[in-house]
Amino acid sequence: MAPSGSRRSGYSRRAQYNLFTGYIVAGVGALLGAGLLILSFFQPTLFGTPRGAAQDAVSPATHSAAWLRTGSRSLWDSISGYYRAGSKNALLKQEMELARIRLAEAEAVRAENRRLKGLLDLRDDGRPQVAVARLVSSTPTSTRRFAYLGAGAAQGVRVGMPVRSARGVVGRILETARGNSRVLLLTDPESVVPVRRATDETVAFAEGRGDSLLRIKLINLGLNPLKKGDIFVTSGAGGYYPPGIAVAIVTQLTDDGGLARIISDPAATDFVAVEPIFEPQALTAAAAPEDGSQGADDGTDAGPADAGTAASPAPGAAAATASDPPASDTSE
């Protein structure tokens, strides 16, 4: 059956009255709202008291909602912070480790600057130089410690001449050719250099060990007066090296002296200077025959001339300390 075209809500008179009443109430409410809105434009303060009373009425509810919102946000931040604490802690540890590394590097630079400033007083550039050349190669895998210099007899280089850099002693000439020379480094086991502590007259021998360290052996045994950081320089005894050239820094103490790190590391040295022998007349006198016999030449190294028996670093005692001529070493 076709739907009825009537728009009536039904045949119930009560329902019709309710619908009509709803329309009337909605219309009156709309008119009242419009009137109040128009009145608020002309009298803005007229409804201040009702608004305040309404705000007071709903204030507990709004405070509760605000507290709940803040508490829930704080709780969420606490929970999320707890789960992020691990990653943040790891990041902070990494940053602290990097900071420690940077601090250690800065401290190392400051310590190196202090050492270099101390070494400035040990340099003496007024001595004549025979030649300035580059260290062209070395023997890193051999038990002996030699280096090869790009200057030889043609440039005036002779056997026994000391070789030094701007920082200190590197070694001395062991063999010469026309255009190159072989240098006996301080770290070679056959190298023995008379030295003294830079701050006083404590004398010793600096002996090579075949590695990057030197063995400092005191002449006067007893209570070890050395300290870590002591700088040793050449004493002038032996006739080869002039006094006052930096040799090594003490890094470890032993019963009869200590172990020292060489100041002029050949691996970090580019150009070096060859200087004349400090006291060639002393070496000549030491090479003269004694008791009718010729001076011994063991064919290894003239190192014993450096390691003479004089306990005084005075240059005048060099003649009494040298025992062998500066014979060249041809053995590896």
Image (cartoon, rainbow, N blue to C red):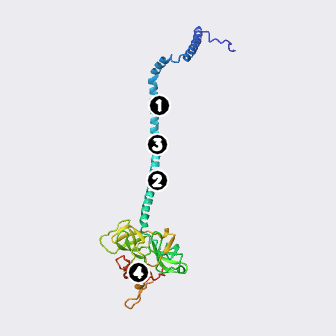
How far apart are the alpha carbons under marks 1 and 2? 41 Å
Residue beneath the point at 45% across and 60% down: 109
Disc 4 residue crowd, few under 14, some 14–19, many 20+, Cα 10 Å: many
Comparing 159 with 78, the one in front is: 159
Q: Name the residue under label 3.
A: 83
Q: Distance between the residues labelled 4 and 1?
A: 91 Å
Q: Position of residue 278 (x, y in %)?
A: 43, 78
Q: Label 2: which residue?
A: 98
Residue 136 visible in image: no
Query: Can you say whether 69 is above or below 178 in the image?
Result: above
Residue wearing tag 1: 69
Q: Which of marks 4 and 3 is in front?
A: 4
* Amino acid type, label 2: Leu
Rendering coords of residue 177 (x, y %)? 53, 81
Q: Residues within 10 Å of mark 1 (few under 14, many from 20)?
A: few
Nearest to viewer (mark 4 / mark 2): 4
Circle 4 is placed at which residue position?
305
Is residue 267 in sight in this rendering?
Answer: yes
